[in-house]
Image: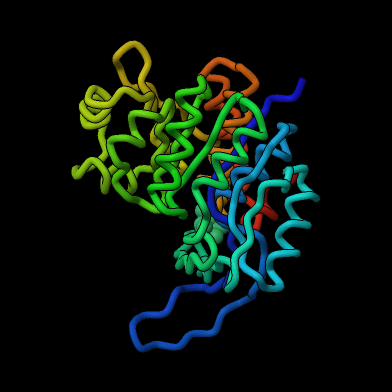
Amino acid sequence: MKPKVCVVGSANIDQVSYVKRTPNDGETVFGDSYQMGFGGKGANQAVMAGILGAEVYVITCLGSDVYRDMTIENFKNNDVITDYIQTVDGSSGVAPIWVDESGQNRIIVIPGANDLIDGSLAIEALEKIGKPDVLVGQFEIPMNVNEQVFSYAYKNGVETVLNPAPANKPSDILLQNTSWFIPNEIEFEEIYGDIFNENNLLLFAKNVDTNVVVTLGEKGCAYIKNNSVKIIKADSVKAIDTTGAGDAFVGAFSFALASKLDIEECLKLALKKATDSVTKKGTQSSYKN
Ligand code: RIB
């Protein structure tokens, strides 16, 4: 049987400009190339789980525009089940992205329909889907919808994975219903209120009832084993485009967790998929071999 993963979250159309360097205030620069692709943290994580072979459901909200049909078709092409996608009047989410010569990205998200996802419909969808092995969420949809779905899933014995991106402090109720909390270094610092280091990670983890993993970009990831911090290193590669690497990590981790791999194996697979993704251009387009 395939591992069953349900992702509740955003879907965007990514509009990516590749530039040698990003412009300063009031400055115009020429870019090298442009590409449009499928993105959104929720969609990216679902697509990665689909590529890896999960039975994956996406609960997201699209607008009444041309992007809707394209997005649904893209999900289907990546083995993501689209039966529980909501549609509202107006525009789908879009994300203008700049990627510079070092592969670093800067992203603006215009949420559009993502902000209008309906929590009650999401719960109805979960009832119909039946118990997934893992439920995944992020912060590109309203916090109260995440609270609803995480509470429902957690109470029904589902392992829940929260990726607090873009950085925002999770409510107590959300954290109490989270099994795995996976910020990156910057998100950790914004949420914890101090720099990321091993001591602060231990202090943060002591005060929450969830497992914590911090992704560290090219340095790998950190997690806690037997009350001490363990770092798993990433392979070193030349980064072309880091956009969506965090989502590749979370999607692959969720697939591995749903497959009942042990945690170190889950993290190693997640790191491998995230590392591979930075060697190719685009967001979801960088997930395939
Ligand atoms: O994490 C990368 C993603 O952030 C992009 O796909 C963009 O749409 C934003 O959601």
Q: Nearer the viewer, residue 279 or 93?
A: 93
Q: Classify the position of the N terminus by image quarter.
A: top right
The relative height of residue 141 versus residue 264 in the rendered view (above or below) is below
Residue 239's spot in the image, x, y percent? Answer: 55, 52
Residue at (35% x, 51% y) in the render: 167
Residue at the extreme top: 226
Splitting the image into 4 quarters, where does residue 56 fall? top right
Q: Classify the position of the C terminus by image quarter.
A: top right
Residue 119's spot in the image, x, y percent? Answer: 49, 47
Residue 223 in sight in this render: yes
How many callouts does the rendering have?
0
The relative height of residue 164 versus residue 225 in the rendered view (above or below) is below
The relative height of residue 204 versus residue 74 in the rendered view (above or below) is above
Splitting the image into 4 quarters, where does residue 229 fall? top left
Residue at (71% x, 73% y) in the render: 66
Horizontal side of 274 relative to 166 (left or right) equals right
Residue 154's spot in the image, x, y percent? Answer: 46, 26
Q: Nearer the viewer, residue 121 or 239?
A: 121
Q: Nearer the viewer, residue 150 or 271?
A: 150
Residue 88's spot in the image, x, y percent? Answer: 60, 65
Residue at (43% x, 50% y) in the render: 139
Display coloring: rainbow
Residue at (67% x, 64% y) in the render: 37
Splitting the image into 4 quarters, where does residue 113 fall? bottom right
Horizontal side of 116 relative to 287 (left or right) equals left
Residue 216 in sight in this render: no
